[in-house]
Amino acid sequence: MINLTIDGKAVCVPEGTTILEAARRANITIPTLCFLKEINEVGDCRMCIVEVEGRKGFATSCIQKVEEGMVVRTNTKEVVEAKRMILDLILSNHQRDCLTCTRNGTCELQKLAMQFNVTQIEYQGAVKIKPIDDLSPSIVRDPNKCILCRRCTAVCKNVQKIGAIDVLERGYESCIGTVNNKSLAEVNCTFCGQCIEACPVGALKEKEMIEDVIEKLHDKDMHVFVQTAPAVRVALGEEFGMPIGTNVTGKMVSALKRIGFEKVFDTNTGADFTIMEEANEFVQRFTKNETLPMITSCSPGWVKYIEMNYPELLGHLSSCKSPHEMFGAILKSYYAEKEGIDPEKIYVVSIMPCIAKKFERQREELKNNGYYNVDAVLTTRELARMIQQYHIDFVDLEESTFDSPMGEATGAAAIFGTTGGVMEAALRTAYETITKEELKNVNFEDVRGEKGIKKATIDIQGNKVKVVVAHGLGNAQKVLEEIKSGNADYQFVEIMACPGGCVMGGGQPIKDAKTRATVDVRALRAGALYSIDEKSKIRKSHENPILKKIYKDYLGEPGGHKAHELLHTHYQKREKYQL
Amino acid sequence: MLVLLFGANKGYIYVRAEYPIAVKRFEVAINQAKEYGILGKNIWNTGFEFELEIRLGAGAFVCGEETALLESIEGRRGQPRVKPPYPANSGLWGKPTLINNVETFANVTKIILNGAQWYASIGTEKSKGTKVFALGGDVINVGLVEVPMGTTLREIVFDIGGGIPEGKEFKVAQTGGPSGGCIPKQYLDTPIDYESLASIGSMMGSGGLIVMDERKCMVNLAKFYLGFTVDESCGKCTPCRIGTKRMLELLERITKGQGKNGDIEKLEKLANMIKKASICGLGQTAPNPILSTIKYFREEYEAHIIKKECPAGECKALTKITINPELCKGCGICKKNCPVGAISGEPKKTHKIDSNICIKCGVCVSKCPFKAISK
Ligand SMILES: Cc1cc2nc3c(=O)[nH]c(=O)nc-3n(C[C@H](O)[C@H](O)[C@H](O)COP(=O)(O)O)c2cc1C
Ligand code: SF4
Ligand code: SF4
Ligand code: SF4
Ligand code: SF4
Ligand code: SF4
Ligand code: SF4
């Protein structure tokens, strides 16, 4: 243990602790801006500087480690003045239009400016105006709001191992850019959106579709249906000040009804379809030993990744569409027929924790009978903004339930939103499909949790099925390399593009660096999903009565002709760069 | 610069690709050393192995900063790392690394050959040995000079350098290039060593030594050096990336006659913050030219800001070229030579300069046979 004093307070922390961390443990907050725990620890912005007795310059508290007898001061006049000046400089080169900025109220820069009582810019000067990139269907990059903290490039390069964005130029001309300064639409970006989650300001955001949806809501001829992904309900409340991991399903449904959606459905029903199809596909492939391991395909960020980086392994990918696409296909076929609605007049909106789904939605192969399965994708954040736009007092809303008959879903579907969830749900169904016996313990603890790559072996009637669960594209890469080299001894793989899975997706409420360093956001949101599963009466997708009915009346067998037409898709090699 | 991994058998010489002669010479030297068996495998049959590799830098000044250099060798963008840890503890590929200037290593061989006592006998109490300077600017003899530490500036400028040309007066010497500060004439007799230079706000730095005569404007000088650091900042940290740019903008305004009361204090405040808060030596020393010129020539800054005058006559926006009616004979030579037609006047009558047209090129000043025109 190391003893030191911070602002006169004696502190004792383990060796290797940073000054910042030591201060936090002593309840002393050192402001930071570029720091993102374990992702970006580079000391660039200089907001975390402190005085260390005996040192000439300031110390960088987010990087530098405590030393025995160290005397640290975080709040001297000089330190505070320097930080104010640094903020002044950042703001002097920043397009300060908070009132019309999506991050107004959640912006870390804005908060610091308030905390340091910066009421005017002392060092005014040239402000470079650079073009905004809004050409991709998923992300808008506004370099004029970028403060060059590099949190985005760190997550893209070091966590996701993509490197779609990096710092270009030098000095004052430095800016975040892509190869040849192309749009993100034309480079190797997967649209996982992890960079958005990392950005402290409004320089990165989703491509909004709120206006399009409102337009359709006012169109008398249109039947506007909405569906919500599992991960949305355990995060949406955060945008209204509720604790992380609060399940707000009932209020969310009420809000969507108040906004005016004709029907509010649950993507979880779609997830149950996915499990039916995916488990069936796996059982087929497993028994025939065909292109194993089979890899899940419900994460469009991941699908784009493999199409661009490992096209030779595309055969391993399950042909299943992602849950909301399956559900959209069912709505515009089975449901439309049943209700006597012209599918042309159906507009399906998906509320997703994801921005890759904005890209996925436009894929030509995700059309049936000439109609896109899904017409608009809104993120959890966009829904929150919409709720505010409609002046709905979310916290005090009454609870409502999803519309029947398409709103029933199982516990298996709920856990789709977290890493390991798809695997667990699929195993529940695969087990019973193969063995025709009841699975006693439906909880597969081995595939749960935060570990980047989880491996487990499941005994299905004497067959040892080895499974792997990976989340985050950096981990996905490791698994793919293993498969490519022929060293994969497993048969079933679940991959999600976002570290933690969809609960931590690129469309989820953004948590500031301090929250991310001190609270396990993933565990709280995932915990809420597991608790939905625990409380569900039905916890296996194949037992969902709605599904049984639809298969019986309409689709036929899982993997059958009709099911294939509506619920499966295909993939293509995709160029990484269009230069 | 030379990078050595100790206890290891690998060394790098990092040199800019733009210096082909230096690169060539290093190649020859390395090959010769290999031929003699003092580099490579099994040196002098001791079993010890040492390889030396030349790494070419792409010309970024900041890649001379030791940790940026290490990043560059490791194949990343040449950006400094936060210190500590210092390279001696965690350097190239995270290993303890000795990284020094080639001049330092050149001295080491001499120390090994002649002994530490011999080396310690040269120089001052704290700064030992000799130092090579690149002497330049307004001085008669320019070139590389090697002097014992502790030699005074006067000896270098006047004895070795031969003094100031055209009979002009010495104004300042800038040591350490853009990282150093200016040394005014009251310090001509200061012995040049690490400590003395630091005490008067300058530094040894790269060993540059530029002499400037009375015609040099100190605000302009600071602006010139700052322009260099702004161009060379890697952009990693806020104080240097934005701060140096803001200082440059302030200086540009001052030299254009748009300075405001309080600008000097603003500059000082920002400069002191940048010195302390920047990550690497580039940012930490970038304010030196400003701080030293303000320290020794504050009145020049004030003249620019308050009187809108450039006492040295270098800042074009602030100089006014006028014809003295008492000396003008109306010869018309100035009118003929003015490139922009700013001068008017009848023959044999006093001529006049339209200051709205005049671009202050100074041609008329030198052409007037009666020395009637002055800045
Ligand atoms: C911006 C910057 C540029 C530098 N450029 C060089 C250089 O070109 N050559 C060099 O030898 N040292 C350069 N240095 C100094 C080195 O980083 C390093 O401190 C020095 O070479 C250490 O060796 P020494 O102790 O032998 O001088 C530079 C330092 C900074 C901050
Ligand atoms: S990024 Fe932050 S500081 Fe900048 S305009 Fe948006 S809210 Fe304001
Ligand atoms: S969306 Fe993902 S892949 Fe694209 S730039 Fe952001 S972090 Fe990188
Ligand atoms: S885009 Fe956002 S995260 Fe990336 S460097 Fe700029 S401010 Fe930081
Ligand atoms: S993990 Fe979830 S949120 Fe992330 S890209 Fe995949 S589907 Fe979207
Ligand atoms: S001081 Fe300047 S050169 Fe050094 S790291 Fe900071 S921005 Fe880069
Ligand atoms: S200084 Fe040049 S431009 Fe001005 S009057 Fe003289 S010759 Fe003409």
Image (spheres, coloured by chain):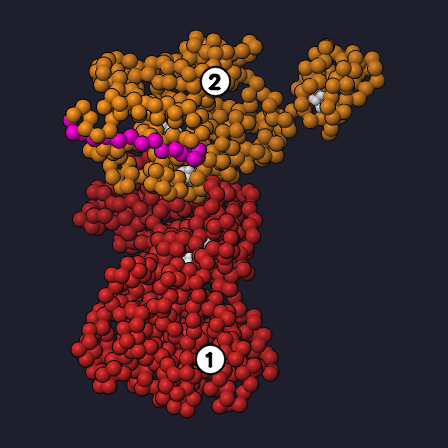
Residue at image coords 33%, 77%: A281
> Bounds of the magenta span?
B46-61
| A98 shown above or below B351 | below
Residue at image coords 39%, 50%: A34
Check residue B295 for magenta coloring. Answer: no
Disc 1 vs disc 2: which is toward the camera? Answer: 1
Q: How far apart are marks 1 and 2 (CA)?
A: 78 Å
Taking the image as drawn, is residue B268 in sight? no
Indicate the position of residue A509 as horizontal and vertical percent values.
41, 66
Identify the residue position indicated by label 2 in the image: B136
Between A344 and B117, which is closer to the camera in this rendering?
Answer: A344
Chain under callout 1: A
Chain in red in the render:
A
Residue at image coords 32%, 22%: B29
Residue at image coords 32%, 73%: A422
| A109 shown above or below A425 | above
Residue type indicated by callout 1? Ala
Chain under callout 2: B
Residue type indicated by callout 2? Gly
Q: Colour of chain B?
A: orange
- Horizontal relation, residue A15 to residue A83: left or right: left
Identify the residue position indicated by label 1 in the image: A329
Local SS, label 1 = helix
Indicate the position of residue B127 as horizontal and vertical percent values.
30, 19
Indicate the position of residue A531 as horizontal and vertical percent values.
29, 77
When asked about the image quadrant of residue A352, the answer is: bottom left
Mark 2 closeness class: few <14, some 14–19, many ≥20 residues within 10 Å: many
Check residue B59 for magenta coloring. Answer: yes
